[in-house]
């Protein structure tokens, strides 16, 4: 029996994808699922960046990080500047499918937004989602501009026949302003996609035990 595949993407970089990925992993672990979290391509390693390592720190989940590139750029650009070859997204999709055959759930965290190029052939996370039949969770910001960014990303998914599983507000401020409060209601209303979770700002600073205790309360 093949396990489920969940792709986590964002409307932009820095919207909270990694913490949302960790929250999904924590939820699956609490449900007793055998999971693995995959970061197909990690850039910015020269700065010590590792989203997979952060997810492992917060949850203790099994993680895999495949292609690593030193500069904090889009993967195709980082690879070109480093003078290295990187795998095409179809190779990533095949590896993810193989993992799904031995796990209850594979959670895949993208790099940047949905259409950031993960290889030098124009392949994107959208292609991985389409090829693997994954459900897609979209992490979005809370503040001004998020309605446009989120609707554009949802439209790109639907253009490929993928209905997003839900939205996650990736960094909810402790003192939300007017824009944030309105966006919390408007995002699901405008996109027709349900709001799955609201993750508080600073959740990534928690230790593993506190994260496991707090994260169930973020789900709607």
Image: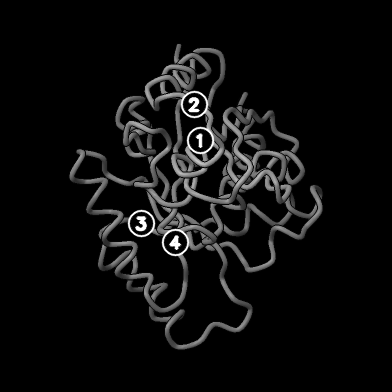
Residue at the disc numbered 4: 140
Q: Position of residue 213 (x, y in %)?
A: 74, 52
Proximity of marks 4 and 3: CB atoms separated by less than 8 Å = no
Proximity of marks 2 and 4: CB atoms separated by less than 8 Å = no
What's the distance in space between the residues labelled 2 and 4, CA to CA?
Answer: 31 Å
Q: Residue at x 54, y 52 (%)?
A: 17
**Label 2 neighbour load within 10 Å: few <14, some 14-19, many 20+:** few
What's the distance in space between the residues labelled 2 and 1, CA to CA?
Answer: 21 Å
Going from N to C along the chain, the mark reached first, 2 or 4, is 2
Q: Secondary structure at mark 3?
A: loop
What's the distance in space between the residues labelled 1 and 4, CA to CA?
Answer: 17 Å
> Which residue ends up furthest to the bottom in the rendered image?
178
**Label 4 neighbour load within 10 Å: few <14, some 14-19, many 20+:** many
Foreground mark, 2 or 1, reads 2
Q: Position of residue 219 (x, y in %)?
A: 54, 56
What's the distance in space between the residues labelled 1 and 3, CA to CA?
Answer: 20 Å
Residue at the disc numbered 2: 85
Figure quadrant of the N terminus: top left
Residue at the disc numbered 3: 194
Say above or below: 123 vs 164: above
Q: Is residue 28 left or right of residue 164?
A: right
């Amino acid at each position: 029996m093949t396990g489920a595949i969940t792709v986590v993407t964002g409307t932009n970089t820095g919207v909270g994808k990694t913490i949302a990925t960790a929250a999904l992993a924590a939820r699956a672990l609490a449900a007793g699922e055998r999971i693995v979290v995959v970061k197909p391509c990690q850039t910015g390693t020269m700065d010590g960046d590792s989203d997979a390592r952060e997810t492992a720190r917060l949850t203790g989940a099994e993680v895999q990080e495949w292609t690593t590139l030193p500069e904090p750029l889009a993967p195709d650009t980082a690879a070109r500047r480093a003078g290295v070859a990187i795998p095409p997204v179809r190779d990533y999709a095949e590896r993810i499918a193989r993992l799904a055959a031995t796990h209850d759930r594979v959670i895949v965290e993208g790099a940047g937004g949905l259409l950031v190029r993960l290889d030098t052939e124009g392949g994107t996370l959208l292609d991985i989602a389409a090829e693997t039949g994954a459900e897609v969770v979209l992490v979005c910001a809370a503040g001004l501009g998020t309605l446009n960014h989120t609707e554009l990303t949802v439209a790109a998914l639907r253009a490929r026949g993928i209905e997003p599983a839900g939205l996650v507000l990736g960094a909810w401020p402790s003192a939300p302003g007017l824009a944030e409060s309105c966006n919390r209601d408007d995002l699901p209303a405008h996109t027709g996609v349900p709001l799955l979770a609201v993750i508080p700002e600073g959740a990534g600073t928690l230790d593993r035990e506190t994260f496991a205790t707090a994260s169930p309360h973020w789900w709607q």
